[in-house]
Image (tube, rainbow, N blue to C red):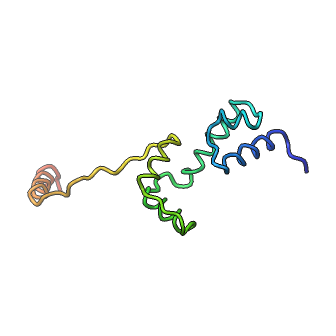
Amino acid sequence: MTLTTFEKNRNAVNLLWGQNIRNAREISQITGVSLRSCERYVSSLKKMIVKRNHFTTAGEMKAQLEEKNPELEVSERIIRRELKNLGFASVLPRRVPLLTQKAKENRLVWANEHVNFN
């Protein structure tokens, strides 16, 4: 079975992506594939990186990388920076203080006043 032009182009982009060439314009110049096609391929490759689980934390990604490549040392900060370079938002969760005892009591008082258990 012969490959179509589309498959050949996609394979060429994947090959360069694997060689850490991530710029669509550079890939287009090397392969001769149209710039717009390269932009679409690169965009889909970027999405596939995080698409598996977009709620994965930088710490979990770090653990996965170090498990697959024991000689690799990478920080969570580097992972967040690279995700940002790929166009993803990487946010740290907001700290929310626990309710104080007084706040819990106030909630119970309010609930008892506003809920009718007849």
**In this view, 64 is above or below 80:** below
71 or 94, nearer to the observer = 71
**95 to the left or right of 70:** left
Asked if residue 118 can be seen in this view, the reply is no
**In this view, 83 is above or below 61:** above
**116 to the left or right of 74:** left
Count of numbered circles on the image = 0
**In this view, 101 is above or below 25:** below
Q: Which residue is rendered at x = 47% and y = 52% of the image? A: 79
Q: Residue furthest right?
A: 1
**In this view, 69 is above or below 113:** below
Q: Which residue is rendered at x = 35% and y = 50% of the image? A: 92
Q: Which residue is rendered at x = 80% and y = 44% of the image? A: 7
The x and y percentages for residue 105 are: 10, 58
The x and y percentages for residue 51 are: 56, 50
Quadrant containing the C terminus is bottom left
Asked if residue 46 can be seen in this view, the reply is yes
The x and y percentages for residue 91 are: 38, 47
Q: Which residue is rendered at x = 72% and y = 48% of the image? A: 15
